[in-house]
Image (cartoon, rainbow, N blue to C red):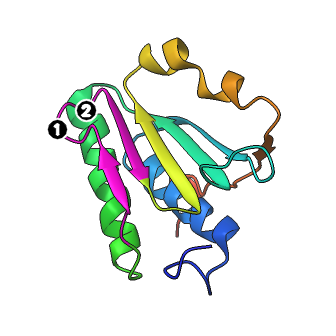
């Protein structure tokens, strides 16, 4: 557990990230619990954007959302290209893809032993 997330409920944080991606029109959002399976991290959150600029915008929205709580990534990859952006926060890693690349790298298949987390999203008509 990193110092940044030591006192934070990571499940709730992943839900906030998923909601941020969803609110910015990201799609195919999946969270995996890979504790005990991966030495890289405890959780992966994977999502998609329509095109490279959309993926970059999603990544920046996630960074802004987390920065507002004092959480900054340890490492960022792919933010200039926007094909596959990786935001490494230590305890969890956010992967954002353009369509097609997600299937090519198939992270869910690589980490198939991980548990898929049910992260409820608030749909626009539920926000009142």
In this rendering, position of residue 93 left or right of residue 24: right
Image location of residue 95, percent across then percent down: 47, 40
In space, the residues marked 1 and 2 are separated at their CA atoms by 6 Å
Disc 2 target residue: 82
Who's the residue at 81% across and 51% down the image?
Answer: 36
Who's the residue at 62% across and 87% down the image?
Answer: 7
Q: Secondary structure at mark 2?
A: loop
Q: Quadrant of the N terminus?
A: bottom right
The one nearer the camera, 9 or 34, is 34
Is disc 1 in contact with disc 2, using a CB cutoff of under 8 Å?
yes
Q: Is residue 102 above or below residue 54?
A: above
Disc 1 target residue: 80
Who's the residue at 66% across and 49% down the image?
Answer: 39
Image location of residue 63, percent across then percent down: 33, 62
Q: Is residue 84 above or below residue 88?
A: above
Span shown in magenta: 72-87
Q: Secondary structure at mark 1?
A: loop
Local packing at callout 2 (Cα closer than 10 Å; few below 14, some 14-19, many 20+) is: many
């Amino acid at each position: 557990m990193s110092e940044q997330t030591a006192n934070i409920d990571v499940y709730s944080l992943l839900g906030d990230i998923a909601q941020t991606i969803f609110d910015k029109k990201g799609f195919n959002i999946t969270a995996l619990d890979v504790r005990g399976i991966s030495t890289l991290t405890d959780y992966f959150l994977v999502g998609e954007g329509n095109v490279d600029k959309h993926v970059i915008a999603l990544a920046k929205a996630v960074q802004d959302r987390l920065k507002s709580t004092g959480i900054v990534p340890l490492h960022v990859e792919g933010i200039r290209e926007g094909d596959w952006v990786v935001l490494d926060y230590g305890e969890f890693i956010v992967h954002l893809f353009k369509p097609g690349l997600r299937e090519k790298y198939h992270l869910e298949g690589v980490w198939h032993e991980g548990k898929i987390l049910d992260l409820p999203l608030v749909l626009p008509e539920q926000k009142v």
